[in-house]
């Protein structure tokens, strides 16, 4: 899948945090700026936009510069005049100043439009189930999304991401690309990293509660239907041809949900990794892990997009919903 990463710009320390992904592996502990140099530096800049007749418009283009690797400049997106980008080097400088720890992974996706960095936090365990904890910094530079800071624990037994419910202290901050963006990123990174260790005990306690709750065979289908509900039937408010397409799409989504419920049930029933451990066997923790494993390891048409979704997209939302639903069993 290296062709899907921008110019093979992916570096990890020791081993990759997710999915065995890794193109540059180093035993040296390096900060973000040094890691960017090792994997291949690049930068972006802004250019004004004009009509064909030369008239300026109130828009500007985000342009990725040509690189030393021979990659031509590329327009990553168009934005309003208030947009102030946080470039790759600026992101790394903010990370090094605020966190001051070696990176675990760093990579560039979508032709350089997305840069992400992870830093390893102290490990912890859930009833003997070992967890590695990471802080993830994601900076989209295409004008479509804000930069994000997310806490993403990883279960050692199967190296899948947990992405705990935000309501229990799993960190997520968003930084808009404006004139205050760099200052906000620097300040929030410093605060988030400092506070992440303090919240580990609370997150661990919540997860350990899940290991004490048994889930019966009869409960599993009901719980999974809440996590993967069937889509609503669309109202008949459009012409026949449009309604036909809506119904076909609804059937597609319903089949998708049914497959997900079936596969997660199989994982929870024993086919999932580590489901024979005391913490996961027949417990709410195990059912939650079944959802996590399915969402982290089911691949779509594009593996990199699947990983992005699992960390901070639609799949991550499903995992959060699963955590909330499983926690509801404890009440």
Image (cartoon, grey):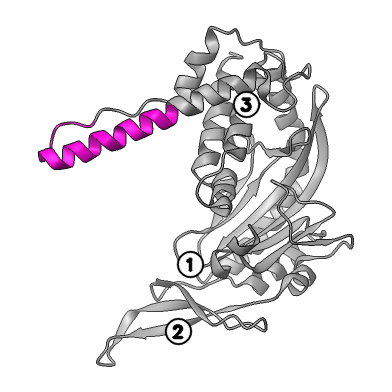
Observer-side mark, 3 or 2, equals 3
Badge 1 or badge 2: first in the primary sequence:
2
- Stretch in magenta: 234-257
Q: Is residue 209 left or right of residue 62?
A: right
Q: Secondary structure at mark 2?
A: strand
Residue 256 point in image, percent of width and height: 43, 32
What is the quadrant of residue 295 in the picture?
top right
Badge number at residue 142: 1
Can I make out residue 228 in this image? no
Mark 1, Cα crowd under 10 Å, few <14 / some 14-19 / many 20+, is many
Quarter of the N terminus within the rendering: bottom right
Question: Which disc number belongs to residue 290?
Answer: 3
Q: Nearer the viewer, residue 12 or 201?
A: 12
Specify the label residue 47 is tagged with.
2
| Helix, strand or loop: magenta stretch | helix
Is residue 215 in the magenta section? no
Within 10 angstroms of label 2, few (less than 14), some, or many (20 or more) residues?
few
Mark-to-mark CA distance, 3 and 1: 34 Å
- Residue 86 is situated, as x and y percent measured from the top left of the image, at 58, 70
Q: In the picture, which quadrant includes the C terminus?
A: top right
């Amino acid at each position: 899948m290296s062709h899907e990463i921008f110019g093979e710009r992916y570096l990890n320390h020791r081993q990759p945090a997710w999915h065995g992904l890794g193109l540059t592996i180093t035993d040296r502990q390096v900060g973000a700026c040094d890691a960017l140099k090792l994997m291949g530096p690049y930068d972006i800049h802004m250019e004004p936009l004009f009509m064909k007749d030369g008239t300026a418009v109130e828009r500007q283009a985000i342009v990725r510069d040509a690189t030393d690797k021979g990659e031509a400049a590329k327009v990553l997106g168009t934005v309003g005049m208030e947009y102030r980008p946080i470039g790759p080097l600026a992101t790394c400088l903010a990370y090094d100043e605020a966190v001051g720890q070696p990176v675990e992974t760093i990579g560039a996706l979508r032709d350089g439009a997305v840069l992400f960095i992870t830093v390893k936090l102290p490990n912890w365990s859930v009833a003997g189930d070992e967890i590695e904890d990471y802080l993830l910094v994601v900076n989209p530079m295409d004008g479509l999304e804000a930069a994000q800071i997310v806490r993403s624990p990883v279960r050692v037994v199967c190296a899948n991401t947990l992405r705990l419910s935000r309501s229990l202290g799993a960190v997520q901050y968003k930084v808009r690309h404006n004139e205050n963006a760099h200052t906000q990123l620097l300040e929030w990174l410093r605060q988030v990293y400092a506070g992440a260790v303090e919240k580990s005990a609370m997150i661990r306690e919540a997860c350990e509660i899940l290991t004490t709750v048994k889930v019966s065979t009869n409960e599993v289908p009901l719980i999974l239907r809440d996590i993967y509900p069937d889509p609503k039937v669309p109202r008949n408010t459009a012409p026949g041809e449009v309604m036909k397409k809506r119904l076909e799409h609804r059937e597609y989504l319903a089949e998708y949900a049914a497959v997900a419920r079936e596969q997660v049930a199989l994982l929870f029933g024993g086919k999932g990794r580590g489901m024979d451990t005391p913490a996961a066997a027949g417990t709410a923790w195990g059912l939650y892990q079944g959802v996590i494993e399915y969402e982290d390891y089911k691949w779509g048409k594009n593996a990199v997009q699947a990983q992005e979704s699992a960390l901070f997209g639609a799949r991550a939302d499903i995992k959060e919903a699963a955590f909330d639903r499983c926690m509801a069993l404890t009440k």
